[in-house]
Image (cartoon, rainbow, N blue to C red):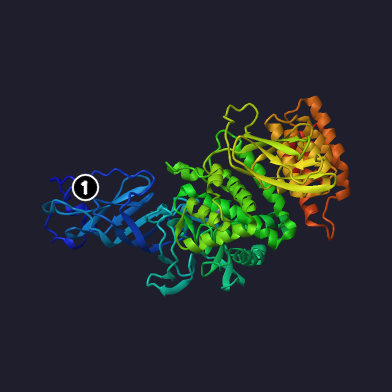
Amino acid sequence: MRTPSLALCLLAGCAADRGNLAPTPKEAVALQALPTLVSPKVRLPPGAAPLSYRLALTVIPGDETFSGETLATVRIDRPLEVLWINATQLQLTAKTLVTEHGVRPAQAVVVDEHFAALVPRCPVSERTCLIAPGMQEVSVGFSGSLSKKDVDGLFQIKEGDGWYAYTSFEPIDARRAFPSFDEPQFKVPWTLSLTVKADHVALANTPQVSEEKLPDGKKRVSFATSQPLPSYLVAFAVGTFDLVDAGVHGQKKTPIRIVTPKGKTAEAKWAAESSGPILEQLEAYFGTPYPYEKLDQLSVPASMGAMENPGLVTYGHQLILSKPEVDTLWRQRGFASVCTHELAHQWFGDLVTMAFWDDLWLNEAFATWMTPRILETWQPTWAQDVAQVGRRHSALGSDALVSARQIRQPIVSNDDIANAFDGITYGKGASVIGMFENSVGREVFQQGVRAYLAKHAWKNATAADFLSAISDAAGKDVAPAFRTFLDQPGAPVVSFKLQCGKGTPTLALSQRRELPVGSKGDSAKTWSVPICVRWSAKGTQGRACTQLDAPTGTLELTGAKACPDWVLPNDRYDGYYRASLQGPLGLVDVYKKGGKALSIPERVGLLGDVSALVRSGDVDAAKMLELAELTAKETDRHLFGFALNFASVGGGDLLPEALRLKHEAFIRSLFSARMANMGWAPKPGEDDDLRLLRPQLLATLGWQGKDPAVLAKAIRDSPRRARRHLGARWRGR
Ligand SMILES: [Zn+2]
């Protein structure tokens, strides 16, 4: 509570904040004491919300500091003692606030690393001093350090001869660049202007609308008012950028540009070619145009990830730029994946934003799930179905740890927000979405996605909103089953035991939590798992599905007229569970007997499950070497990749010396002939898979096999690099 006292603010120190109370210079007015300020925890308290911002900044790359003013229209819901805002490492000055007694000077008090209080200052004679409910224009001046070390908030990087300024605000770094209500629920229009050097280019989320020369040789660049955005999606950049015109694309003919530091336009070739088609594929899936007026794809000269700021997406330069003479297919496919992810966010995350960070999966899991859905249409040869099975495999690996988070994790500290950006949110989230997508049917799921986006466009949404949209489309409530994966950590191992006797063959099912061997975690957990299997009996194939809601269950293989030769326990391998086959028919047998009747992703899934079950102690490790020999004969790059993996037995370095030499010989026996056949350099017309496989094979033969031909070639072609990398491994052999 405010405690009026006789303490004086002798106005020498408060003159800037005095507004319409300004007395004559010799006059001194006794002000009420500042209230005791206890900062909120994590979130801003209720009672006030911004409705729009005008934001003006002066950003001169090369300078040590930046400065500006935030002018926010704020709705005050009830009388408030102070107005809390977010600010980190900023110097603040406030002007006025409207109190119950009228306009009064305001003081900005930085209370801790994340919060500042705007406090009205009333004379002692008024006894109370509460901010009045209603609309208020709240103005806060600020200045801060234009960091040369950090790559979050507002920072600068030198590239070539020049300094460039960039922003990176997700999740809670907008408060380092300007004071605001820095939470995703506050989604409002922003009108931005930047004062910059006359020869600099200034970019923001929206198109530039005007440019005004200033007397001091600078210029003020003003941008169009944005669609509603949370603070973490605001972005701008300043510097001597080059702009690569990538044409206009999509239903609204959106102009796309690749933005590079000066002199690097040649490195943007692939980004310029691929961004437009990706945007068009996304529009086709969502059934709505790209939501914003323009798309700038901005290269930041730092090794960092990418960020989906509407209209101004940022990428670490290693993702988006490459000199044409050294560019690789890996890099190009990598950019296409990241670009698809970031552009998917323009709908999932930007157009519809999670209400708070506990629903980060609504952004990240969806953008991750969406990526193969788009790329498989645009680039059908890129084996996105295999990539999805691989992603599921990695996520299950993380989820097996007892320390694994749940997808939807309550946020009780700022660390919880940072920790939410992990493989569980992205990989598990995407895999679980994929499982339920296939469970309700892809077209039904797409209808649900479109309805969700239409209903919550330009607003916030929660997990419940999304699950309700999918349930409406599916005509059944999917939420209870979905939530068993969303709200608890871990993943199930489902055991299948084939029972053949009189009548229809049946699978006895049971589930437990997957845990690594030796783990003390509790395995007695239950999920509602959509399960589909495929079987083959005497040349006839069939499919059977169920939802396993309890620790045990059964699944009849309806249509099987004899005991099946094999049962694939995860049809298409889109179910988010490990499969373990009990009894005489193990996973390796299914791999051998299923052969080409199993798709490549299914075989990749089976092999992934075998390697996981070796880790959990359910399958004998010797099976790895058997499978290495089996998969070394495969022509498909992904299956052959398992041979490289299985044969490596953890890199071989842990083996005793005598076994290590045998292991090296084993590697050479499996792979040297293949290498010789493939040749050192790509041949004209060679397919992409072979190009992608060659470096993997070379690495395994060189590192694990100490193949003399590979090592000699490495030393001959690049002696310094080879000696630096190989070092003692090469000497003495
Ligand atoms: Zn993302």
> Above or below — where is 248 with respect to 309?
below
Report if residue 706 is visible in the image. no
Q: Nearer the viewer, residue 144 or 501?
A: 501
x, y percentage for residue 667? 82, 36
Apparent side of residue 265 relative to residue 557 in the rendered image (left or right): left
Residue at horizontal 42%, vertical 41%?
A: 412
Apparent side of residue 511 relative to residue 608 in the rendered image (left or right): left
- Total of numbered circles in the picture? 1
Q: Nearer the viewer, residue 547 or 18?
A: 547
Apparent side of residue 308 relative to residue 137 in the rendered image (left or right): right
x, y percentage for residue 567? 76, 41
Quadrant in the rendering for residue 266: bottom right
Label 1: element kind: loop
x, y percentage for residue 432? 60, 47
Apparent side of residue 342 relative to residue 71 in the rendered image (left or right): right
- Judging by the rendered image, the residue that carries numbered circle 1 is 34
